Image (spheres, rainbow, N blue to C red):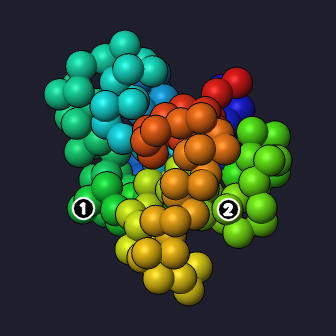
């Protein structure tokens, strides 16, 4: 799985032991891209409890203590080149990027220098243009093969 080489490198640089294998590796990659536990469970046909257990192991290996810290550790640099986002303005793509990476409205606003209400407005526009109704749907749309 080529998409995990960056993951392996990041975990190795963080002092993680041997590379993750199998489902843990897949869970780690999806979590690093901002997927919620529910989405990861659905994508990988695992129970949410199993995903949470794997996540605890992965977070420990990465040297972080929460999902937010893990996302910050791995934040996906850009989804803007994703063809799915081509119908969006540059600013909408930036907001979509942050939302798909798991950031909250407040965190997105802080990251992009926007008010929470402006992010809310962009979010509605993005969801309408892309035909999605949640951040989980946005993640699935932007990360589908």
User: Is residue 64 found left or right of 133 in the rendered image?
Assistant: left
* Residue at figure coordinates x 31%, y 36% from the top left: 37
Mark 1 sits on what residue? 65
- In the rendered view, would you say 19 is above or below 95? above
Characterize the local packing of mark 1: few (<14), some (14-19) or many (20 or more) Cα atoms within 10 angstroms. Answer: few
Mark 2 residue element = helix
Mark 1 residue element = loop
* Residue at figure coordinates x 52%, y 65% from the top left: 121
Q: Residue 54 at what x, y percent from top left?
A: 28, 34
User: Is residue 41 found left or right of 103 in the rendered image?
Assistant: left
Q: Residue 129 at what x, y percent from top left?
A: 66, 44
Mark 2 sits on what residue? 92
User: Is residue 98 found left or right of 81 in the rendered image?
Assistant: left
Can residue 75 be seen in this snapshot? Answer: no
- In the rendered view, would you say 88 is above or below 114? above
Q: Nearer the viewer, residue 121 or 112?
A: 121
Q: Residue 33 at what x, y percent from top left?
A: 53, 47
* Sequence-first tag of 1 and 2: 1
Q: Quadrant of the N terminus?
A: top right
* Residue at figure coordinates x 23%, y 27% from the top left: 48
Total marks in image: 2
Residue sticking out furthest to the top: 45
User: What is the spatial separation of the Cα atoms under label 1 and label 2, in whole angstroms?
Assistant: 31 Å
* Residue at figure coordinates x 56%, y 86% from the top left: 113
């Amino acid at each position: 799985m080529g998409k995990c080489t960056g993951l392996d490198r990041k975990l190795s640089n963080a002092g993680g032991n041997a590379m993750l294998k199998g489902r843990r590796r897949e869970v780690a990659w999806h979590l690093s891209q901002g997927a919620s536990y529910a989405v990861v469970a659905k994508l990988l046909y695992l129970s949410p409890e199993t995903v949470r257990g794997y996540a605890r192991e992965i977070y420990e290996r990465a040297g972080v203590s929460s999902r937010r810290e893990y996302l910050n550790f791995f934040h996906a640099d850009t989804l803007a080149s994703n063809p799915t986002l081509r119908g969006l303005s540059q600013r909408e793509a930036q907001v979509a990027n942050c939302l798909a990476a798991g950031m909250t409205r407040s965190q997105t606003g802080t990251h992009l220098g926007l008010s929470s209400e402006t992010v809310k407005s962009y979010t509605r526009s993005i969801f309408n243009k892309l035909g999605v109704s949640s951040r989980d749907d946005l993640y699935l749309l932007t990360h589908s093969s």
